[in-house]
Amino acid sequence: MRICMKKDSLKFDWNHARAFLVTAEQGSLSAAARVLGLTQPTLGRQVNALERELDVTLFERVGRGLTLTQSGLYLLEHVTSMGMAAEHVSLAAMGQSQSVSGTVCISVGEIYGSLVMPKIVKKIKDEEPGITIEIVASNETSDLQKREADIAVRAFRPTQTELITKKIKEMSGTFYATPSYLKTLGPINTVQELGRASFVSLGSRETYLKAMAGFGLTLTDENISVLCENHIVHWEMTKIGLGIGVAPQDIGDTEPLVQRVIPDFDLVQFPIWLTTHRELRTSKKIRLVFDLLAEALAR
């Protein structure tokens, strides 16, 4: 299949191609408009302009969404390559910047973003006041290659060759509850004795019960006191005594409202990795924030 520019077309507009690419990735104009920070009518005009330039139909409307035509599928492969090349150009240019000012975006999980990062960001700002820190606090993995963040704090080691990774430390997580709640249970010395306790579930009921079974703890629906998806909500529910919750030990051990349910028991171990794109590592501001972040997290 070939797609040709109209004879009277003078140029290929990358903004129109990018509008098409993001719309194809998101599946609807409304979702793509949110990603690009445009209004839906503006985005629609850009996609329509590309269709006129190429003299093809790229999308068909299906319900509230869009589906690619054969021409759209063919073009998507090429525009995706263009998008990746544009990202590499942007990363390379950013990597050459030696300015110690501007914005550095850090992706981090919800609970660390809320309870650990504020003090670290304060330290970074004290040392480098010209740098603006943007925090993306989400348990979804940010794509560094698509510039969704400049630096990521992760509990796993990324495998992409384009990324630079540094292992900061090994962490442990365990069960926590308020002293008043633990008094209602009586002495707890083994994981199996937790079968009579109530828990603040993190995620769906089925997923949580399956995860606990993997740790040797058999629970039923009756053991679930509260269901929630957000890590911060889960922790706040634990702190007021609604049941037993799970937290990293550097957070749980420093919270005066709770204590370990089984003092010497580690429920789960996980690493803390710091990651950035290889080309960004040559940027002075990225390098400074990366090193300050690594130092602070290691403590």
Image (cartoon, helix red, strand yellow):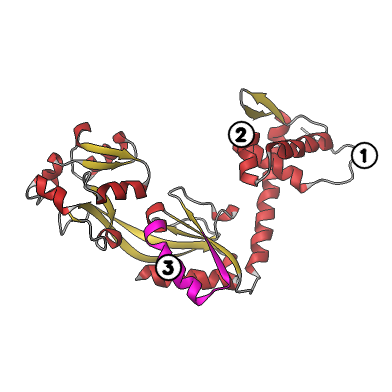
Give, as a single range, the part of the protein colored magenta. 114-134
Find disc 2 in the rendering and name its residue: 27
Decide whether residue 75 is among the magenta residues: no
Q: Specify the amino acid type for callout 3.
A: Ile
Q: Quadrant of the N terminus?
A: top right
State the image coordinates of residue 180 (x, y, percent, origin top left). Answer: 14, 51
Secondary structure beneath disc 1? loop
- The residue shown at (83%, 37%) is 53
Residue density around tag 3, few if under 14, some if 14–19, many if 20 or more, within 10 Å: some
Q: Secondary structure at mark 3?
A: helix
Q: Which callout, 1 or 3, points at the residue further toward the start of the chain?
A: 1
- Disc 2 from disc 1: Cα separation: 30 Å
Kindly identify which residue carries mark 1: 8
Which badge, 2 or 3, comes first in the chain's sequence?
2
> Is residue 261 in sight in this rendering?
no
Task: Kindly identify which residue carries mark 3.
Answer: 120
From the top left corner, tell me how far across and down residue 211 is, in percent: 27, 42
Q: Position of residue 162 (x, y in %)?
A: 56, 59
| Label 2: few (<14), some (14–19) or many (≥20) C-alpha neighbours in 10 Å | some
